[in-house]
Image (tube, grey):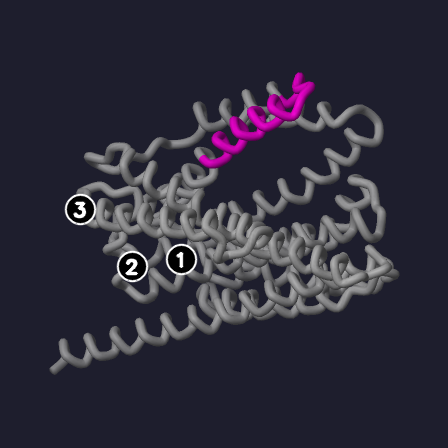
Protein backbone atom coordinates (compact mmCIF):
# COMPACT_ATOMS: atom_id res chain seq x y z
CA UNK A 1 0.00 0.00 0.00
CA UNK A 2 2.90 2.32 0.73
CA UNK A 3 4.45 1.55 -2.64
CA UNK A 4 1.17 2.41 -4.33
CA UNK A 5 1.07 5.67 -2.41
CA UNK A 6 4.61 6.49 -3.53
CA UNK A 7 3.67 5.93 -7.18
CA UNK A 8 0.64 8.20 -6.76
CA UNK A 9 2.73 10.93 -5.13
CA UNK A 10 4.89 11.19 -8.28
CA UNK A 11 2.20 10.26 -10.83
CA UNK A 12 1.84 12.62 -13.80
CA UNK A 13 -0.38 10.60 -16.14
CA UNK A 14 -3.51 8.45 -15.94
CA UNK A 15 -1.68 5.12 -16.56
CA UNK A 16 0.66 5.89 -13.66
CA UNK A 17 -2.31 6.73 -11.43
CA UNK A 18 -3.95 3.42 -12.33
CA UNK A 19 -0.74 1.53 -11.52
CA UNK A 20 -0.50 3.27 -8.15
CA UNK A 21 -4.13 2.55 -7.36
CA UNK A 22 -3.68 -1.10 -8.34
CA UNK A 23 -0.68 -1.45 -6.01
CA UNK A 24 -2.49 0.29 -3.15
CA UNK A 25 -5.58 -1.84 -3.76
CA UNK A 26 -3.51 -5.02 -3.71
CA UNK A 27 -2.00 -3.93 -0.40
CA UNK A 28 -5.41 -3.21 1.06
CA UNK A 29 -6.68 -6.59 -0.12
CA UNK A 30 -3.79 -8.27 1.73
CA UNK A 31 -4.18 -6.18 4.88
CA UNK A 32 -7.92 -6.27 5.57
CA UNK A 33 -8.60 -10.03 5.77
CA UNK A 34 -5.30 -10.63 7.55
CA UNK A 35 -6.05 -8.02 10.21
CA UNK A 36 -9.52 -9.49 10.79
CA UNK A 37 -8.06 -13.00 11.05
CA UNK A 38 -5.47 -11.80 13.59
CA UNK A 39 -8.18 -10.17 15.70
CA UNK A 40 -10.26 -13.36 15.60
CA UNK A 41 -7.25 -15.46 16.60
CA UNK A 42 -6.30 -13.15 19.47
CA UNK A 43 -9.76 -13.35 21.08
CA UNK A 44 -10.96 -16.99 21.21
CA UNK A 45 -13.88 -16.14 23.54
CA UNK A 46 -16.88 -15.39 21.26
CA UNK A 47 -18.18 -12.43 23.30
CA UNK A 48 -14.77 -10.76 23.63
CA UNK A 49 -14.13 -11.47 19.96
CA UNK A 50 -17.37 -9.69 19.01
CA UNK A 51 -16.22 -6.62 20.93
CA UNK A 52 -12.80 -6.74 19.29
CA UNK A 53 -14.34 -7.04 15.82
CA UNK A 54 -16.52 -4.02 16.63
CA UNK A 55 -13.35 -2.06 17.46
CA UNK A 56 -11.86 -3.28 14.17
CA UNK A 57 -14.97 -2.03 12.32
CA UNK A 58 -14.85 1.30 14.16
CA UNK A 59 -11.21 1.73 13.09
CA UNK A 60 -12.18 1.15 9.44
CA UNK A 61 -14.96 3.71 9.85
CA UNK A 62 -12.44 6.16 11.28
CA UNK A 63 -10.35 5.72 8.15
CA UNK A 64 -13.40 6.35 5.97
CA UNK A 65 -14.11 9.54 7.89
CA UNK A 66 -10.54 10.87 7.84
CA UNK A 67 -9.76 9.98 4.21
CA UNK A 68 -12.13 12.40 2.43
CA UNK A 69 -11.28 15.26 4.80
CA UNK A 70 -7.51 14.89 4.39
CA UNK A 71 -7.92 14.56 0.62
CA UNK A 72 -10.08 17.68 0.60
CA UNK A 73 -7.48 19.60 2.59
CA UNK A 74 -4.77 18.49 0.17
CA UNK A 75 -6.84 19.63 -2.82
CA UNK A 76 -7.57 22.97 -1.21
CA UNK A 77 -4.07 23.99 -0.13
CA UNK A 78 -1.67 21.76 -2.09
CA UNK A 79 -2.13 19.30 -4.95
CA UNK A 80 -3.98 16.00 -5.11
CA UNK A 81 -0.61 14.22 -4.93
CA UNK A 82 -0.19 15.39 -1.32
CA UNK A 83 -3.16 13.29 -0.18
CA UNK A 84 -1.18 10.10 -0.79
CA UNK A 85 1.72 10.97 1.49
CA UNK A 86 -0.55 9.70 4.26
CA UNK A 87 -0.35 6.20 2.72
CA UNK A 88 3.40 6.18 3.22
CA UNK A 89 3.23 7.34 6.83
CA UNK A 90 0.41 5.00 7.85
CA UNK A 91 1.98 2.10 5.96
CA UNK A 92 5.27 2.53 7.82
CA UNK A 93 3.54 2.83 11.22
CA UNK A 94 1.31 -0.19 10.58
CA UNK A 95 4.25 -2.30 9.45
CA UNK A 96 6.20 -1.36 12.58
CA UNK A 97 3.27 -2.26 14.85
CA UNK A 98 2.63 -5.52 13.02
CA UNK A 99 6.25 -6.63 13.26
CA UNK A 100 6.69 -5.73 16.93
CA UNK A 101 3.29 -6.12 18.58
CA UNK A 102 1.12 -8.56 16.63
CA UNK A 103 1.21 -12.29 17.33
CA UNK A 104 1.43 -14.42 14.20
CA UNK A 105 -1.11 -17.16 13.50
CA UNK A 106 -1.07 -19.86 10.87
CA UNK A 107 -3.36 -22.65 9.74
CA UNK A 108 -1.49 -25.97 10.25
CA UNK A 109 -0.59 -27.38 6.85
CA UNK A 110 -2.08 -24.37 5.07
CA UNK A 111 -0.71 -23.22 1.75
CA UNK A 112 -1.79 -20.75 -0.95
CA UNK A 113 -4.72 -21.86 -3.09
CA UNK A 114 -3.58 -20.42 -6.41
CA UNK A 115 -6.14 -22.22 -8.62
CA UNK A 116 -8.97 -20.99 -6.40
CA UNK A 117 -7.50 -17.48 -6.27
CA UNK A 118 -7.15 -17.22 -10.05
CA UNK A 119 -10.51 -18.80 -10.91
CA UNK A 120 -12.43 -16.83 -8.28
CA UNK A 121 -10.86 -13.51 -9.22
CA UNK A 122 -11.33 -14.03 -12.96
CA UNK A 123 -14.93 -15.18 -12.53
CA UNK A 124 -15.88 -12.23 -10.33
CA UNK A 125 -14.07 -9.79 -12.63
CA UNK A 126 -16.05 -11.01 -15.64
CA UNK A 127 -19.28 -10.89 -13.65
CA UNK A 128 -18.61 -7.28 -12.60
CA UNK A 129 -17.69 -6.41 -16.18
CA UNK A 130 -21.01 -7.86 -17.35
CA UNK A 131 -22.92 -5.81 -14.78
CA UNK A 132 -21.20 -2.54 -15.72
CA UNK A 133 -20.86 -2.96 -19.47
CA UNK A 134 -24.36 -4.44 -19.83
CA UNK A 135 -25.84 -1.36 -18.22
CA UNK A 136 -24.43 0.75 -21.07
CA UNK A 137 -24.68 -1.56 -24.08
CA UNK A 138 -27.49 -3.95 -23.10
CA UNK A 139 -27.39 -7.15 -21.08
CA UNK A 140 -28.34 -9.25 -24.12
CA UNK A 141 -25.62 -7.98 -26.45
CA UNK A 142 -23.11 -10.51 -27.76
CA UNK A 143 -20.31 -9.03 -25.64
CA UNK A 144 -22.43 -9.05 -22.50
CA UNK A 145 -23.64 -12.61 -23.01
CA UNK A 146 -20.12 -13.88 -23.68
CA UNK A 147 -18.92 -12.15 -20.47
CA UNK A 148 -21.73 -13.70 -18.45
CA UNK A 149 -21.10 -17.14 -19.94
CA UNK A 150 -17.40 -16.90 -19.17
CA UNK A 151 -18.10 -15.72 -15.62
CA UNK A 152 -20.51 -18.57 -14.89
CA UNK A 153 -18.09 -21.12 -16.38
CA UNK A 154 -15.15 -19.84 -14.33
CA UNK A 155 -17.18 -19.68 -11.12
CA UNK A 156 -18.51 -23.19 -11.78
CA UNK A 157 -14.97 -24.53 -12.13
CA UNK A 158 -13.99 -22.53 -9.03
CA UNK A 159 -16.68 -24.30 -6.98
CA UNK A 160 -15.60 -27.71 -8.28
CA UNK A 161 -11.93 -27.02 -7.48
CA UNK A 162 -12.65 -25.65 -3.99
CA UNK A 163 -14.74 -28.68 -3.05
CA UNK A 164 -11.84 -30.99 -3.91
CA UNK A 165 -9.00 -29.18 -2.13
CA UNK A 166 -7.86 -29.99 1.42
CA UNK A 167 -7.10 -26.33 2.17
CA UNK A 168 -9.34 -24.27 -0.12
CA UNK A 169 -9.30 -20.50 -0.26
CA UNK A 170 -13.06 -20.62 0.43
CA UNK A 171 -14.31 -23.73 2.23
CA UNK A 172 -17.72 -24.11 0.61
CA UNK A 173 -18.49 -27.06 2.88
CA UNK A 174 -18.95 -24.62 5.77
CA UNK A 175 -21.93 -23.15 3.92
CA UNK A 176 -23.95 -26.27 4.67
CA UNK A 177 -24.67 -24.54 7.96
CA UNK A 178 -27.49 -22.04 7.21
CA UNK A 179 -26.25 -19.76 10.00
CA UNK A 180 -22.86 -19.44 8.33
CA UNK A 181 -24.44 -18.85 4.92
CA UNK A 182 -26.70 -16.22 6.49
CA UNK A 183 -23.70 -14.46 8.02
CA UNK A 184 -21.96 -14.26 4.62
CA UNK A 185 -25.12 -12.92 2.98
CA UNK A 186 -25.70 -10.34 5.71
CA UNK A 187 -22.07 -9.20 5.72
CA UNK A 188 -22.20 -8.76 1.93
CA UNK A 189 -25.52 -6.91 2.17
CA UNK A 190 -24.15 -4.42 4.71
CA UNK A 191 -21.21 -3.48 2.48
CA UNK A 192 -23.38 -3.49 -0.66
CA UNK A 193 -25.51 -0.77 0.86
CA UNK A 194 -22.81 1.13 2.73
CA UNK A 195 -20.32 1.48 -0.12
CA UNK A 196 -22.87 1.68 -2.95
CA UNK A 197 -25.12 4.32 -1.36
CA UNK A 198 -22.11 6.31 -0.09
CA UNK A 199 -20.86 6.54 -3.68
CA UNK A 200 -24.23 7.94 -4.76
CA UNK A 201 -24.11 10.49 -1.94
CA UNK A 202 -20.63 11.69 -2.91
CA UNK A 203 -21.56 12.04 -6.59
CA UNK A 204 -24.76 13.95 -5.80
CA UNK A 205 -23.04 16.30 -3.36
CA UNK A 206 -20.33 17.09 -5.91
CA UNK A 207 -22.32 17.28 -9.13
CA UNK A 208 -25.65 18.68 -8.00
CA UNK A 209 -24.82 20.65 -4.86
CA UNK A 210 -21.47 21.67 -6.35
CA UNK A 211 -19.51 21.07 -3.13
CA UNK A 212 -15.73 20.84 -3.06
CA UNK A 213 -13.96 17.66 -1.99
CA UNK A 214 -13.32 19.14 1.46
CA UNK A 215 -16.96 20.21 1.88
CA UNK A 216 -18.15 16.74 0.85
CA UNK A 217 -15.83 15.14 3.40
CA UNK A 218 -17.03 17.45 6.17
CA UNK A 219 -20.72 16.84 5.42
CA UNK A 220 -20.21 13.08 5.28
CA UNK A 221 -18.78 13.19 8.78
CA UNK A 222 -22.43 13.13 9.86
CA UNK A 223 -22.64 9.64 8.37
CA UNK A 224 -19.16 8.28 9.05
CA UNK A 225 -19.04 9.74 12.56
CA UNK A 226 -22.33 8.04 13.35
CA UNK A 227 -20.97 4.84 11.80
CA UNK A 228 -17.98 4.93 14.16
CA UNK A 229 -20.14 5.63 17.23
CA UNK A 230 -22.57 2.86 16.28
CA UNK A 231 -19.70 0.40 15.74
CA UNK A 232 -18.40 1.14 19.23
CA UNK A 233 -21.89 0.80 20.70
CA UNK A 234 -22.37 -2.49 18.84
CA UNK A 235 -19.30 -3.89 20.61
CA UNK A 236 -21.03 -3.29 23.94
CA UNK A 237 -24.55 -4.28 22.92
CA UNK A 238 -23.52 -7.51 21.18
CA UNK A 239 -22.37 -8.93 24.53
CA UNK A 240 -25.84 -8.37 25.97
CA UNK A 241 -28.15 -9.08 23.05
CA UNK A 242 -26.04 -11.14 20.65
CA UNK A 243 -25.37 -10.24 17.00
CA UNK A 244 -28.68 -11.14 15.34
CA UNK A 245 -30.95 -8.36 16.68
CA UNK A 246 -28.26 -5.76 15.99
CA UNK A 247 -27.78 -6.97 12.41
CA UNK A 248 -31.50 -6.98 11.64
CA UNK A 249 -32.16 -3.61 13.27
CA UNK A 250 -29.05 -2.12 11.65
CA UNK A 251 -29.92 -3.27 8.14
CA UNK A 252 -33.48 -2.01 8.42
CA UNK A 253 -32.24 1.36 9.69
CA UNK A 254 -29.75 1.48 6.82
CA UNK A 255 -32.59 0.76 4.38
CA UNK A 256 -34.58 3.60 5.96
CA UNK A 257 -31.62 5.97 5.62
CA UNK A 258 -31.10 5.00 1.97
CA UNK A 259 -34.83 5.46 1.34
CA UNK A 260 -34.74 8.91 2.94
CA UNK A 261 -31.80 9.91 0.75
CA UNK A 262 -33.72 8.67 -2.31
CA UNK A 263 -36.22 11.51 -1.73
CA UNK A 264 -33.60 14.28 -1.91
CA UNK A 265 -34.35 17.26 -4.16
CA UNK A 266 -31.86 19.27 -6.27
CA UNK A 267 -32.20 22.39 -4.12
CA UNK A 268 -31.96 20.68 -0.73
CA UNK A 269 -29.36 21.90 1.74
CA UNK A 270 -27.55 19.91 4.43
CA UNK A 271 -30.37 20.24 6.96
CA UNK A 272 -32.76 18.52 4.54
CA UNK A 273 -30.68 15.35 4.10
CA UNK A 274 -28.67 15.27 7.34
CA UNK A 275 -31.18 12.87 8.92
CA UNK A 276 -30.74 10.46 6.00
CA UNK A 277 -26.95 10.49 6.49
CA UNK A 278 -27.20 9.95 10.25
CA UNK A 279 -29.79 7.14 10.05
CA UNK A 280 -27.86 5.39 7.28
CA UNK A 281 -24.56 5.59 9.18
CA UNK A 282 -26.25 4.39 12.38
CA UNK A 283 -27.76 1.36 10.67
CA UNK A 284 -24.58 0.34 8.87
CA UNK A 285 -22.53 0.78 12.05
CA UNK A 286 -24.86 -1.40 14.10
CA UNK A 287 -24.90 -4.20 11.49
CA UNK A 288 -21.32 -4.14 10.20
CA UNK A 289 -19.30 -5.72 13.01
CA UNK A 290 -22.01 -8.11 14.33
CA UNK A 291 -22.51 -9.57 10.84
CA UNK A 292 -18.77 -10.29 10.71
CA UNK A 293 -18.72 -11.71 14.24
CA UNK A 294 -21.71 -13.94 13.42
CA UNK A 295 -19.79 -15.65 10.63
CA UNK A 296 -16.72 -16.29 12.77
CA UNK A 297 -18.83 -17.75 15.59
CA UNK A 298 -20.37 -20.49 13.42
CA UNK A 299 -17.24 -22.43 12.48
CA UNK A 300 -15.39 -25.23 14.28
CA UNK A 301 -12.72 -24.13 16.82
CA UNK A 302 -9.39 -23.38 15.20
CA UNK A 303 -10.91 -22.24 11.91
CA UNK A 304 -11.80 -18.71 12.97
CA UNK A 305 -9.05 -17.18 10.85
CA UNK A 306 -10.21 -19.02 7.74
CA UNK A 307 -13.80 -17.98 8.42
CA UNK A 308 -12.67 -14.37 8.92
CA UNK A 309 -11.08 -14.36 5.49
CA UNK A 310 -14.19 -15.82 3.89
CA UNK A 311 -16.50 -13.36 5.63
CA UNK A 312 -14.26 -10.49 4.59
CA UNK A 313 -14.27 -11.78 1.01
CA UNK A 314 -18.08 -11.71 1.12
CA UNK A 315 -17.92 -8.14 2.44
CA UNK A 316 -15.64 -7.03 -0.39
CA UNK A 317 -17.78 -8.75 -3.03
CA UNK A 318 -20.79 -6.92 -1.59
CA UNK A 319 -18.90 -3.62 -1.77
CA UNK A 320 -17.88 -4.18 -5.39
CA UNK A 321 -21.41 -5.22 -6.37
CA UNK A 322 -22.83 -2.18 -4.57
CA UNK A 323 -20.71 0.30 -6.50
CA UNK A 324 -21.11 -1.59 -9.79
CA UNK A 325 -24.85 -2.19 -9.68
CA UNK A 326 -25.98 1.06 -8.08
CA UNK A 327 -23.49 3.11 -10.09
CA UNK A 328 -24.65 1.47 -13.33
CA UNK A 329 -28.32 1.98 -12.45
CA UNK A 330 -27.68 5.65 -11.73
CA UNK A 331 -25.71 6.20 -14.95
CA UNK A 332 -28.27 4.40 -17.11
CA UNK A 333 -31.18 6.29 -15.55
CA UNK A 334 -29.43 9.63 -15.99
CA UNK A 335 -28.62 8.86 -19.64
CA UNK A 336 -32.22 7.82 -20.30
CA UNK A 337 -33.56 11.02 -18.72
CA UNK A 338 -31.30 13.16 -20.87
CA UNK A 339 -32.21 11.19 -23.99
CA UNK A 340 -35.89 11.72 -23.15
CA UNK A 341 -35.34 15.48 -23.27
CA UNK A 342 -34.78 16.44 -19.65
CA UNK A 343 -33.94 20.15 -19.64
CA UNK A 344 -32.47 20.33 -16.14
CA UNK A 345 -29.37 18.10 -15.78
CA UNK A 346 -29.33 18.62 -12.00
CA UNK A 347 -32.90 17.39 -11.65
CA UNK A 348 -32.21 14.46 -13.98
CA UNK A 349 -29.11 13.48 -12.00
CA UNK A 350 -31.02 13.77 -8.72
CA UNK A 351 -33.74 11.53 -10.10
CA UNK A 352 -31.11 8.97 -11.14
CA UNK A 353 -29.46 9.05 -7.71
CA UNK A 354 -32.86 8.65 -6.02
CA UNK A 355 -33.69 5.68 -8.25
CA UNK A 356 -30.40 3.94 -7.45
CA UNK A 357 -30.60 4.76 -3.72
CA UNK A 358 -34.14 3.37 -3.61
CA UNK A 359 -32.86 0.19 -5.24
CA UNK A 360 -30.13 0.03 -2.60
CA UNK A 361 -32.78 0.30 0.13
CA UNK A 362 -34.73 -2.55 -1.47
CA UNK A 363 -31.61 -4.74 -1.61
CA UNK A 364 -30.94 -4.07 2.09
CA UNK A 365 -34.48 -5.15 2.99
CA UNK A 366 -34.33 -8.22 0.73
CA UNK A 367 -30.95 -9.28 2.14
CA UNK A 368 -32.28 -8.88 5.67
CA UNK A 369 -35.37 -11.00 5.01
CA UNK A 370 -33.33 -13.72 3.29
CA UNK A 371 -30.81 -13.76 6.14
CA UNK A 372 -33.58 -14.02 8.73
CA UNK A 373 -35.08 -16.93 6.80
CA UNK A 374 -31.74 -18.76 6.76
CA UNK A 375 -31.24 -18.15 10.48
CA UNK A 376 -34.74 -19.48 11.17
CA UNK A 377 -33.91 -22.58 9.11
CA UNK A 378 -30.75 -23.08 11.17
CA UNK A 379 -32.81 -22.77 14.36
CA UNK A 380 -35.28 -25.42 13.20
CA UNK A 381 -32.45 -27.78 12.26
CA UNK A 382 -30.84 -27.30 15.66
CA UNK A 383 -34.16 -27.94 17.40
CA UNK A 384 -34.72 -31.14 15.39
CA UNK A 385 -31.17 -32.35 16.11
CA UNK A 386 -31.61 -31.67 19.83
CA UNK A 387 -34.94 -33.49 19.86
CA UNK A 388 -33.44 -36.51 18.08
CA UNK A 389 -30.51 -36.55 20.52
CA UNK A 390 -32.82 -36.51 23.53
CA UNK A 391 -35.05 -39.14 21.94
Q: Which residue occupies 57% across, 44% down? A: 60
26 magenta-colored:
yes
Please name which of the two marks, 3 or 2, marks the residue nearer to the observer: 3
Disc 2 designates what residue?
Answer: 175
Q: In terms of image quadrants, where is residue 86? A: top right
Q: Nearer the viewer, residue 105 or 6?
A: 6
Q: Is residue 65 left or right of residue 390?
A: right
Q: Mark 2 near mark 1, Cβ–Cβ under 8 Å?
A: yes
Query: Label 1's element?
Result: helix
The answer, for residue 237, to whether it is visible in the render is yes
Say which quadrant the C terminus sits in: bottom left
- Residue 6 is situated, as x and y percent measured from the top left of the image, at 61, 19
x then y, percent, for residue 331: 66, 53
Q: Residues within 10 Å of mark 1 (few under 14, many from 20)?
A: many
Q: Nearer the viewer, mark 1 or mark 3?
A: 3
Residue pointed to by mark 1: 184
Secondary structure found at label 3? helix
Q: Residue at x 29, y 59 (%)?
A: 175
Pick out the residue farthest to the top.
Answer: 10
The residue under label 3 is: 164
Query: How far apart are labels 1 and 3 at the CA level?
Result: 21 Å
- 197 drawn magenta: no
Percent coordinates x, y for residue 35 in the rendering: 44, 38
Q: Is residue 285 visible?
A: no
Residue 360 against residue 36 in the figure, above or below: below
Q: Which residues are magenta?
A: 8-29
In this view, 189 is above or below 311? below
Amino acid sequence: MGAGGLVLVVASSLPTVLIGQALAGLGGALITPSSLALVSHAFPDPRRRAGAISAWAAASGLGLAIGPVTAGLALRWWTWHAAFWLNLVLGALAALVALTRVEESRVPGGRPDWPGQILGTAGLALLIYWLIDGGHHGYTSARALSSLTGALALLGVFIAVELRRDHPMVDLRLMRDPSYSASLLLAATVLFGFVGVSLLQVLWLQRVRGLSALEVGVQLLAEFGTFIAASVAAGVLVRKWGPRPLIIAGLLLAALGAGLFATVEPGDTFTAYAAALVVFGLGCGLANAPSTALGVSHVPPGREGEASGTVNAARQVGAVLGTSILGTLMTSRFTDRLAAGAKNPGAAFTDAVGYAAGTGAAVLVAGTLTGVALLALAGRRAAVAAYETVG
